[in-house]
Image: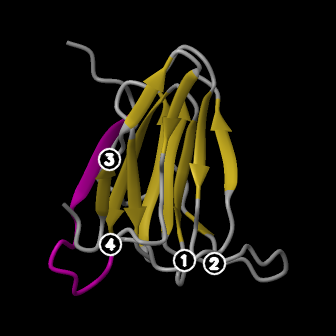
């Protein structure tokens, strides 16, 4: 696992009315602080990435569909420099992924319908000075190929 990345297996509690799934609690070991909560989606086969933040930690949970979330440690001097983590998460595998600053990350919808991600970052989004830096998903030096591997 990339240094600083943490995961939390999520428990789904179903009953005849529906289901409940806690994602992030202020008493969780990985909770730092609250910035905002937002929803982002991707259509089948769409890649959103790469991007990173300088200050912000992300806490992502896929609540509908399935996503492949990929992280890349590009931090010079990190003990896990160059390491890639790949997570297949969503309806069939509920998990929170805690992503520290400077870790490049992106996701790809791998379900047959739109997938939805809830993110609870530690910082608010500043429209005039965003803590968001992008890298092209395909034309870059990251040793990762987003294509599906059949076999």
Which of marks 2 and 4 precedes in the sequence? 4
Q: Which mark is residue 56?
A: 1
Q: Say whether residue 82 is magenta.
A: yes
Give the spatial CA distance, label 1 vs label 4: 17 Å
Which of marks 3 and 4 precedes in the sequence? 4
**Can you give x and y, in whole percent of width and height, for residue 67 in the image?**
46, 34
- Identify residue for label 4: 29
Reply above or below: 14 against 38: above
- Identify residue for label 3: 144
**Can you give x and y, in whole percent of width and height, for residue 52 in the image?**
51, 69
Question: Marks 3 and 4: in contact by CB < 8 Å?
Answer: no
Identify the image quadrant of the N terminus: bottom left
- The local secondary structure at tag 3 comes to loop
Question: Marks 1 and 2: in contact by CB < 8 Å?
Answer: yes
Q: Nearer the viewer, mark 3 or mark 1?
A: 1
Which of marks 1 and 2 precedes in the sequence? 1
Can residue 144 be seen in this snapshot? yes
The 10 Å Cα crowd at callout 3, few under 14, some 14 to 19, many 20 or more, is few
- The local secondary structure at tag 4 comes to loop
- Identify residue for label 2: 123
Q: Nearer the viewer, mark 4 or mark 2?
A: 4
Reply above or below: 86 against 149: below
| Range covered by the magenta-colored residues | 75-90
Quarter-of-image position of residue 140: bottom left
Residue at 46% from the left image edge and 79% from the top image edge: 32
Residue at 60% from the left image edge and 17% from the top image edge: 113
Taking 41 as reference, is 29 left or right?
left
Q: Nearer the viewer, mark 1 or mark 4?
A: 4
- The local secondary structure at tag 2 comes to loop
Give the spatial CA distance, label 3 vs label 1: 23 Å
């Amino acid at each position: 696992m990339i240094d600083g990345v943490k995961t939390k297996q999520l428990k789904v509690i179903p009953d005849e009315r529906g289901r409940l799934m806690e994602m992030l609690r202020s008493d969780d070991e990985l909770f730092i602080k609250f910035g905002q909560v937002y929803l982002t989606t991707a259509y089948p086969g769409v890649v959103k990435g790469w991007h990173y933040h300088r200050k912000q930690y992300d806490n992502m949970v896929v609540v509908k569909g399935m996503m492949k979330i990929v992280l890349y440690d590009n931090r010079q001097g990190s003990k896990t420099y160059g390491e890639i983590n790949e997570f297949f998460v969503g309806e069939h595998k509920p998990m929170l992924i805690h992503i520290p600053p400077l870790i490049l990350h992106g996701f790809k919808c791998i379900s047959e319908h739109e997938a939805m991600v809830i993110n609870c970052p530690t910082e608010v989004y500043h429209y005039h000075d965003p803590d968001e830096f992008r890298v092209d998903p395909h034309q870059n030096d990251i040793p990762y190929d987003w294509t599906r591997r059949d076999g």
